[in-house]
Amino acid sequence: MMRIFCVAEHRFDQLNQISLEILNLANKIKGKGTSEAVVIGKKVDAFAKELANYSDVVWKIEDESLENYNPELYIDVLMQLLSKEKADLILIGNTAYGSEFAPYLAVKMGVPIVTDVVGVNVVDGLKVTRYIFQGKLMVDLAVKTPCILTVRQGVFKESVNLNGKIIDSKIKPSKAAVRKFRKFIEPEVGEVDISKADVIVAVGRGIEDGANVPLAEELAKLLGGVVAGSRPVIDSGWLPKDRQVGISGKIVKPKLYLALGISGAFQHVMGMKDSELIIAINKDKSAPIFGVAHYGAIADIFEIVPELIDKLKKIKKS
Amino acid sequence: MQLKEYLLSLKKESPNLKVDRGGGMKVFVLAKHAADPESEIKVSSDGKNVETSGLIFDINDWDRYAIEEGIRIKEKIGGEVVVVGVGKNCDDTLRKCLAMGADRAIKIPVDTNDAYQIAELIKKAIEKEKFDLIIAGYMSQDMNYSLVGALLAGMLNLPFATAVTSLKIDGGKVVAVRELEGGYKEEVELQIPCLITVQSGINEPRYVSVMGIKRARTKEIREVKLELPPSAVNILKIYPPPIKLAEILTGDASQIAAKIVEIVKSRGLI
Ligand SMILES: Cc1cc2nc3c(=O)[nH]c(=O)nc-3n(C[C@H](O)[C@H](O)[C@H](O)COP(=O)(O)OP(=O)(O)OC[C@H]3O[C@@H](n4cnc5c(N)ncnc54)[C@H](O)[C@@H]3O)c2cc1C
Ligand SMILES: Nc1ncnc2c1ncn2[C@@H]1O[C@H](COP(=O)(O)O)[C@@H](O)[C@H]1O
């Protein structure tokens, strides 16, 4: 009988979708076991009710000091809960919060951990699947239980409706945290909102240099769109921060997303996969971007883009 | 006087004073000699490994930011930067870090890609040394675990923060800005000693000069021989992901461009 504990996540008074996705996964693999959500915060009744729709049990852990996420306090209260309630599997979202505290928790519990999991099989012992090499390969791993898995978002979307019972754990942090939360910082806003654009010409590291960005700008202008970029382009200062597409940038759904020299790492793809039309140009035939694009060209952007500009100019003239 | 007390005493006199020197900070930086995901990746015939023959190894992308951050701290407030690498063939990466400005290196000549094992080995190699700050990269570019830093923090009982995009040393405190989703960030405060993992973009890593590489030749790389700890994770199979491929447009540059224009036109976008 497998007991699967799922640590929920919330910010700005909203439950993160990943909290439900890990419960979906738990329900899929639990067999005769249970899916048990854990929700930690200052006041979590509303979250607990929402989570109960998708779990067998919801554990509430409430305290004034738990208002904002803090890894030390999360680990402290989870250790208290899990020393009484024996989990076979602990599922945590592979998010900015989850990916931070999960490894530390694994050390404290003395259990193995696998991160960014996209597949789980329990037929013959625990087997999990994850990507390596930035999405270019997959690996199947056998892991001893009990263990912790952090789960990639957007993978386990199929839900089952349950009506779990909510339990107040009465657990309180046993000490104050050394690390202090100070404040949230809002995203930077620029003059162009890429999430509103119909056409996006997105450049990746393949653009090689900031000096080549105007080439993409010219193309974008001809298409009536804007230029955006993958993270390395923004990190290098070739485009402003608010032009970043992806998990730590913006989610965009334009009518056309033209990806130039972008490999298609998951963190980028999460920000553009729902675009209506995706065309990717990349010189590497095994680039994962071809897995999300509708059309692709295995070619050099510095050969294709000038041709495109040329042709579009001719159309504009006629 | 301990560094922490010293820094705190300075802070009392002038809260905004940048500490200039006082033994400074001892910073450990973890740097992986990692395979580049853009190099030629082939699965070995047993289906459990990646062929090393086609792979190009270099300093892990995130660790360039880690070493740069460590060196900047030293340049600002003094101290020492020690770079740590696990791997039989990690010398090139350690040398690169030394050339960038690290003072010395510790090499643990063990080949493993198991994050627990790597963290355990690093713990054993450094636990007897005193340090103020450990900086790791957010993630390795080949294994993409995002584990070693936080595991090590757990093993050493250190306060920590991951995915840091800005770091300030302010008295005995470390003020770190962490990246959350959607462009949001959170600012947190840690006490020295602590561990952070850095996200890309936190700084602009410097280029390694020829002079730097020459100078670095005299810097020490100390080998620490350790036994491989056990692993709880077992690789069953490595394989290319099953993907539904895009419709591939063929021809020369002009033909491909013409096809793209056609598609865009047919959607009424131009
Ligand atoms: C927590 C976290 C959050 C992240 N958030 C984001 C995010 O929000 N957005 C984001 O984009 N990334 C994000 N990343 C980074 C992400 O993992 C990848 O590193 C990044 O997306 C890679 O960008 P890229 O495709 O431009 O570069 P690379 O992966 O370096 O790819 C460059 C591509 O260009 C191709 N190329 C090179 N030259 C040419 C040429 N002349 N013609 C055609 N093709 C060429 C290459 O074949 C290669 O495929 C995040 C990572 C982490 C860990
Ligand atoms: N073999 C290694 N040697 C030194 N540091 C490593 C090694 N493997 C991982 N690290 C450090 O841990 C970080 C995260 O790696 P990973 O947990 O593999 O994603 C890297 O950015 C490095 O700072």
Image (cartoon, grey):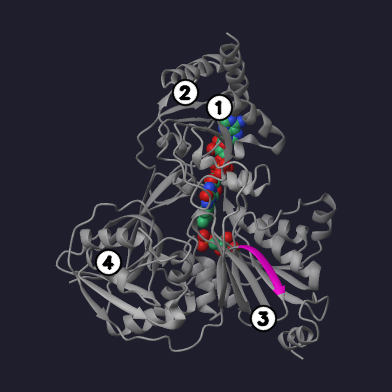
Q: Which three-letter amino acid code belongs to the residue tagged 4?
A: Leu
Residue B168 among those drawn in magenta:
yes
Q: Which x, y percent locates residue B170? A: 72, 76
Circle nearer the viewer, 3 or 1: 1
Q: Circle 3 is placed at which residue position?
A: B129
Residue B162 among those drawn in magenta:
no
Q: Which three-letter amino acid code belongs to the residue tagged 1?
A: Gly
Residue range (magenta):
B165-169
Distance between the alpha carbons at the discs numbered 1 and 4: 44 Å
Q: Circle 1 is placed at which residue position?
A: A224
Q: Residue at x 48, y 51 (%)?
A: A247
Distance between the alpha carbons at the discs numbered 3 and 2: 63 Å
Does residue A135 appear left or right of residue A18 in this picture? right
**Numbered disc 3: what chain?**
B
* Number of other residues with Cα within 10 Å of mark 3, as a class: few under 14, some 14 to 19, many 20 or more: few
Dot 1 beta carbon under 8 Å from ligand 1: no
Circle nearer the viewer, 3 or 2: 2
Distance between the alpha carbons at the discs numbered 3 and 1: 59 Å
